Amino acid sequence: MAKTHVTTTINGEPVEFLCDANQTMLDVLRDQLGLTGSKEGCGSGDCGACSITIDDRLVCSCLMLAPEAEGHSIQTIEGMAQGDKLHPLQKKFVELAALQCGICTPGFLVASKALLDRNPNPTETEVRYWLAGNLCRCTGYDKIIRAVMDVAADMQKEAAR
Amino acid sequence: MNDVKYIAARTLDEAVAAMAAANGTGRVLAGGTDLLVQMKAGVVSPGVIVDVKKIAEMMTIDEKAGSFRVGAAVSGAVIGEHAGLKKAWPGIVEAVNLIGSKQIQGRASAGGNLCNASPAADSVPALVAAGAMVTVQGPKGRREVPVEKIHAGPGRTTLERGEIVVSFTLPARPPGSSDAYLRLIPRTEMDIAVVGCGVSLTVQNGTCTSARVSLGAVAPTVLLVEDAGKALTGSRLDDKALEAAAAACRAACKPIDDKRGTIVYRTKIAGVLLKRATAIAVERAGSR
Amino acid sequence: MSSQRYKWIGTRPDRPDGADKVTGRARFGADFNMPGQLIGKVLRSPHAHALIKSIDTSAAEALPGVKSVVTAKDFPDQPNVIVPTGEMQVNLRDITRNVMAREKALYEGHPVAAVAATTEAVARQALALIKVDYEVLPHVIDVDAAMKDDAPVLHDHLITEGVKPVPEKASNIAKRMDNVKGDVEAGFKLAEVVIERSYTTQAVHQGYIEPHATLASAAEDGQVQIWSTTQGHFQVRGFCSRLLNIEASQIRVTPSEIGGGFGGKTVVYLEPVAVRLSQKTGKPVKMVMTREEVFRASGPAPGGTVKVKLGARKDGRIVAAECTVALQAGAFPGSPLGPACWTSFACYDIDNIKVVGFDVVSNRPKVAAYRAPGAPISAWGVESTLDILAQELGIDPIDLRLKNAAKKGTKTSYGPTFDTIGFVETLEAVKNSAHYKTPVKKGFTRGVAAGFWFNVGADSSAAAHVAEDGTVTVISGNPDIGGSRASLALMAAEELGVDYDKVRPVIADTSSIGFNFVTGGSRVTFATGLAVVNSVKDMVRELKVRAAKTWKVDPEAVVWENGMARPAGSNVGEFEPLSLAQLAATAGRTGGPINGHAQLNAQGAGPGFGVHVVDLAVDRDTGIVTIDRYTAAQDVGTAIHPSYVEGQLQGGAVQGIGWALNEEYIYNAKGRLDNAGFLDYRMPVASDLPMIETILVEVPNPHHPYGVRGVGEVPIVPPLAAVGNAVARATGVRMTDLPLSPPRLSAALDAVTPRMAAE
């Protein structure tokens, strides 16, 4: 069976790849494009460790077929920092110890950024429900929620200046 | 295994033709949040995957004279951002938005939720309570079907080979109308409904002039509980009417014992959710 | 707090692996690839119990793209020998059979064969072509059923250890254990109140988000390289060496970053198989478990039954305590029965104790360690019973525990006498906490429970090297699962007197540092920390020698302060202090490279005690429990990096909450796991919880230079009963069976006050 040729944009860069019709975007990211930042925790959309955005929409890359990327814009964890400048969420996660083993961290960062891009001033409840699709087994979520709310508060202060 | 073909159909005719040509091995791909899970589990092995997300009619929401047409492949996230739909049908919107996580919402569609035909599908009881009509297109042409006629059994629909669900039509309603959907899950998110209950009603001068009630996860298909609707209609939605409707819900249940709930529990919860969902719908109707 | 006493210890700097972990650069188990690698996949038994009559791999081997197929015949049989692994003991004969079934399939998911192929798709196809001739046998899942006389027997050779006379027939009871202190019969006669209850728990999985993954590359000369996501790469080396008859020094294991372990990654599943496949094919072989495989075939924590009997005087003083525990071991003996028994009454000073335990096999995956293995189960029973006692006597639950608290000098039921411990301090901290002093909100109730874990020491090796510019590398060999790298760097910086940023901690592979026992047992900050401190001390000793040489004085005349060598007094001479950088720059002329080393079997691990408080509400109509407020207090010795200590308390508490409310293994009538995924194995999600407040009580461990106590495991011990106690006080119904899932809780509430009819 001939492979499908896909032309897409990943983290702002044009990318082309060949894939089988039934390969997931997660598989292609990890196994063909060397972008191993997105993780497979379950393969069934229940843990969020594979979170990416497609056209700024938060999705699980394990539940997306790679051919669907054609013509769209994909953002992964690898695109979050700008050069050597970490995104405020990335900095805050390290500062507030919002990670222990770190396997869920890329997914949480992508999901948190998607939240703050849409709702820059969420309540704690809104943050928790938005991130309910990201499982963490190490932290009990406390420091992750605090980090996201802290960044939101910082952004509010910045905006007020 | 790698003989799967992927087609991104540009038109509905192209999609229908591709599904018909696939001879039963075709699968529609909207959000893929059920399809890909089933493919990975080996439950489904499509020969052709027909991506419908380039078909405008399936991907848009229109409103005309109070009636809404919702494309079957529109994602839950987009539905949740539609101000008009949220205002007119808060129950349907919240039901769709309860499917999975935010990530799932970025992809999952009401059409997919309906056609996957899980008895526990979250969006379906709200659509059934609403009296939604489904537009179906197939090799033999287009037809309109009441949404409660689509489910045939767990994982089975009444759709014929090659048919695609195109959109849902929600009727215009008089002022004093609203709806609500509640489900019981063990956690606060990320679970399949143990019981789901959709209530849609119109209240005028304190009297319920029309009501429809639907239950999910308590029978092989999503149920339209006509007796519950009748118990509410014409009533002042007092405790007696609510208890009668709850009893009708409990009587209509044909649940199973499984890893998510027991027969006893589901039957009890059906009544509990009816009362709570009705209260929410009434409060919303009052503010409309 | 510690930050007042120390310069670096007690502060909260960025962890050294932070940038890599927040950018996706950090490489976990499945993130490694090698050119030409093959993908390995495992064929697993669909039956809970079956004889394996034959395996025909010919069709699989003939499939294009398949390079090798292995079964038990590719692995040597192993003798009946026990080796320590993590906090458990395992039998090599059993381990080889768990890695690859030999005579029998003993649980659904048990590996029976494996293939290596050019792609995952081909590997999966090959699995389907392997023909296994099973003779299905009757199976048994639950402990009580497995203990019955007529239960299907898993192992013909299994004679119960620890009973007299020695049984003649094989059974599923691998071991009986007895712990006695004083005389419980006499003790109960002194009791004015006796409470007796039976409890059950279900098996739960550690739930690490990263599935098991490994990549093995065997060379033609017999050397083997392994990358593995593991809590113990020396353990991986040891197991592969024993199971495959390869000399240890031929094997080099590099630990990847690890995406959670909690005890479940202190054993091997895939590594020996990947190595064998690589040996047979001459290519690297990568193997990654799916989530389903993780649930079906990797060790959960056992479920079990606990019977507790407490006798007390009316003033609350406990005079006698008895506990009988039966734990699931899974398909092979080795549940954490010992720790379950030993920890059961460890929090309390009781004169008369009797604990009996049973290790029982059944047709389920072999259990593995899970955070304080065994302790949460016996604590569920003991702490719930204590709460009943508190209610009976009308005594505040904290006060009841204070009346009976273990202290320095208390002798445990399992032998040792406690040195300095912090249980009383922790109880008082909770009593005086903001949470406990706040009245319970209307509609909510409060539950309290305590917990204990020994914490271990064991073997660690470390080294400290200084570079030419005076910056330091600290090398140790424990995978970092929770931020321990940062703590090691903090202790090294403190000991050396240099900035934290000048110290780089590195986790070395098995060939690059001496032996290290696993990351587990809450031991790394304590034992490896000790090794790191000692290696720095060794380096400082050498630095003083170099300074002495430079100044031409006696080494005894040199002191090391704030990262500099100074003369001990003005009578030594007038010398400018020499910094690390200066000494390092001249190292070649004063004797060569300046390195420090240390290796030890750490003694003096300090036990830990936790006290948790939870405020929750129960929806009586639905049985849904909503947690409103949660506080975890614990004596943590010295909080080296307080953020990561808090993190351990929070993470353990939430795992315990999941264990209490919704997590369980559900088997169907065929002995197959019904909920092998995150959808129906329900771990807590962010919206289920409030913030988890923490109280770090610092009662330094006198046996560590910085007072370190292990902290990681204690936090999972109290939550089960804390939640159960609050639910009991909310509803008047004492739940004894976990989890308190809504259908179960609802049924229990309805049995007491039927509400359906009243609707």
Image: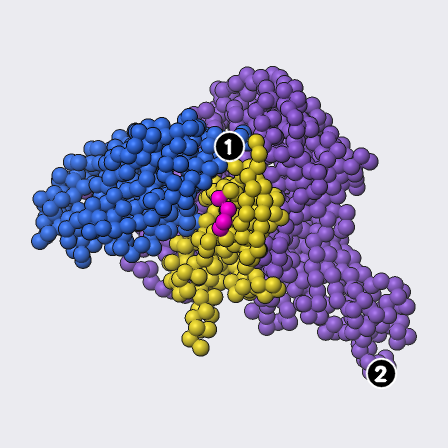
Chain colours: A yellow, B blue, C purple
Please identify the dominant SS of the magenta region: loop
Helix, strand or loop status at disc 2: loop
Residue C619: percent from left, percent from top:
29, 48
Amino acid under label 2? Glu
Residue C663: percent from left, percent from top:
44, 42
Q: Nearer the viewer, residue A46 or C356?
A: A46
Amino acid under label 1? Val
Q: Nearer the viewer, residue B218 or C482?
A: B218
Kindly identify which residue carries mark 1.
B4
Rendered view: C628 above or below B126: below
Is residue C160 found left or right of C653 in the rendered image? right
Q: Residue at x 30, y 35 (%)?
A: B136
Mark sitting on residue C87: none
Please provide the residue range marked out in magenta.
Answer: A68-72
As for residue A71 lying within the magenta part, the answer is: yes
Helix, strand or loop status at disc 1: loop
Q: Residue at x 12, y 47 (%)?
A: B208
Kindly identify which residue carries mark 2.
C574
Image quadrant containing the N terminus of chain C: bottom right
